[in-house]
Image (tube, rainbow, N blue to C red):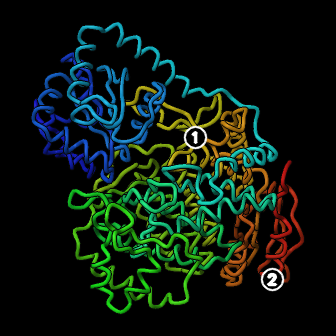
Amino acid sequence: MSRNLLAQEISPYLLQHKDNPVHWRPWGPDALAEARREDKPILLSVGYAACHWCHVMAHESFESDEIARLMNERFVSVKVDREERPDIDGIYQSALALMGERGGWPLTMFLTPDGEPFWGGTYFPPTPRYGRPGFPQLLQAIADAYRSDRAKVETNVTALRAGLSKMQSPEPGTGLTMQTLDEAAQFALRLVDAHKGGTSGAPKFPQPTFFRFLWRAYKRSGETALGEAVTTTLDAICQGGIYDHLAGGFARYATDEIWLVPHFEKMLYDNALLVDLLTEVWLETRTPLYARRIAETVDWLMTEMRVDAPDGGSFAFASALDADSEGEEGKYYVWSEAEIDAILGGDAAAFKAAYDVRPGGNWEGQCILNRIGAAGLANDEAVLARCRERLLAVRRRRVAPGRDDKVLADWNGLTIAALAGAGAVFEQPGWIEAAAAAFRFVTTRMSDGQRLRHVWRAGIARHPGVLEDYANMSRAALSLFQVTGERAYLDQAEAWVAVADRHFRDRSAGGYFTSADDTTDVITRPKAAFDNAVPSGNGTMIEVLAGLFFATGTVAYRDAADAAVQVFSGSNPQYLLGVPGLMTAYEILVAASQVVIVHDPGDPVASAFRSTALQSPSAVRFVMSVEADGDLPAGHPAAGKPAIDGAATAYVCTGQTCGPPSTTPAELLARLADAAPAAAM
């Protein structure tokens, strides 16, 4: 069938390509069968709706009749949305890395009709430039090699197959200790730009998972340099151009080393993870800037990223906002000095001084609003707030970047956990209610009652859930359980982990595969713990298993977590830098304080104890509420502990030992401070 087949898809990214002259196919058995039938190689193109360079390659090559004719004659061309199919993207990004190439999007891979990779790259221009071959010449060379040099193709296939197979069975490490974590933190500290924040050089990514690991190391050790690595980074991110100072929300990364010039797309996961990290750091620093950025970003989530269920009752969050509008990256966000003067009048001078507005601009003749170099918040914040509102009203009349409104279970899990945690810390019940609404959306719209679907859009749920869906949604459930005390969230986390154990867990060696055991359209099932832009499913699952062990006392959860730590622990600090989420989860597993609140049904004081525990600067803790008649297994260290004089009572337990009862929130706060984890074990 010689036509483009993307019109029936629900992915905004795939739909962006439905009118290309390329005869695109969605990923699946039909595309592979067509390639086998016609004995053509597969050209696999992977991207996402908010990707700037994906748009560039689409305009330059995929909209070209001449290039499309070559693709249609010599290849079966397949389009994949990396956000819809992270398992597919992960496999072929790994294959590209095995070739010694740097990954990214758009990903351009050449496969056999069985889906096995033999060559690839990322962006290719239509004519030779940037040191890269022109795309038409590349297509011709690959097609010729496939037709006349099949032995070389098979050599590449065999080598890559062997490398990919190792991803299913990583070499087990020797395990972790708290001392190992401290040593890895010292190694990681060398990578940090002590003056500008982030890791050294450009581009600069926020890396919340990496900096959460450093923050936890600071909390254990008290070493100032570790804490300053995190606060310097967060200060720079919150004041830089990577932050949208008018509407809230963080861009994906900065292209320079001072955080001025963003890659203007905004991703849901970055904002969820940054809200989470900012909240945790604020608990100790009480920095007003962090509290403001959290509130502004939550407001952005609720106004610009909300996706309502068709019949109301719940909502979730969209995946991303594009970098481009009217064909230009960043056009929606930048200003000229003349525009600022015309809009703000007498307030313009104060605003320009605060936000780096210059006559010639600070980027390509335009101004990216930023407060780099500003020390916290200014005395005239009320004036600046009024200016921002006026500018935002004008900006909203511009052509806005596109919104990728598909709902992803894993990214929504990150957002639910962040909203629940921040809502508890800042005493914002509306944020907790939003987290609960998004949780209902996923459980009702993206589940058949047992198995999760990865993506929902326009009333349709598609694609089986991957490990990150189960891990992040289970973590979200445990966050809501801790914040609300409602046992239904704990029950749901247990149900999802049971599915993960049944369909994803490697029972022979430990850890979890990315794809379920009944996934039929992947050439391999990777098993990894490396954190990328989002935390790894395995690292998050260890954190979840730790929480379930604390809440239920079920030893099988602890055993599964121990096995996963063992298989992914590696053997050197440099490896461990790639798995900060795993190390953070390990600390929770072995050193978390358990706060058990024993109370009679309906006792309102129990919520005060929960708030106190969740607002404690002690980050490594798990909070649970149980009714006085007993809701704990016999082996739990707090089993049988009474509510003193019938009033709500809290116990802080570490390992198998519980401290004395706390009958007031102030007592609980002091005991949590005493239970902070030691520097090494």
Q: Residue at x 31, y 58 (%)?
A: 322
Q: Residue at x 66, y 68 (%)?
A: 281
In front: label 1 or label 2: 1
Asked whether, in this view, residue 245 is left or right of residue 359, the answer is right
Q: Is residue 382 above or below residue 292?
A: below
Location of the N terminus (image quadrant):
top left
Q: Position of residue 278 (x, y in %)?
A: 59, 67
The residue indicated by pointer 2 is: 664
The residue indicated by pointer 1 is: 530
Q: Residue at x 86, y 48 (%)?
A: 681
Q: Is residue 311 visible?
A: yes
CA gap between label 1 and label 2 equals 42 Å
Q: Is residue 308 visible?
A: no
Q: Secondary structure at mark 1?
A: loop
The kind of residue tagged 1 is Phe
Q: Position of residue 75 (x, y in %)?
A: 21, 24
Q: Is residue 240 above or below residue 1?
A: below
* Disc on res. 213: none
**Disc 2 residue crowd, few under 14, some 14–19, many 20+, Cα 10 Å:** some
Q: Secondary structure at mark 2?
A: loop
Q: Residue at x 34, y 69 (%)?
A: 360
The kind of residue tagged 2 is Thr
Q: Nearer the viewer, residue 118 or 444?
A: 118
Q: Is residue 556 above or below residue 424?
A: above
Marks 1 and 2, the one that precedes in the sequence: 1
Q: Quadrant of residue 438?
A: bottom left
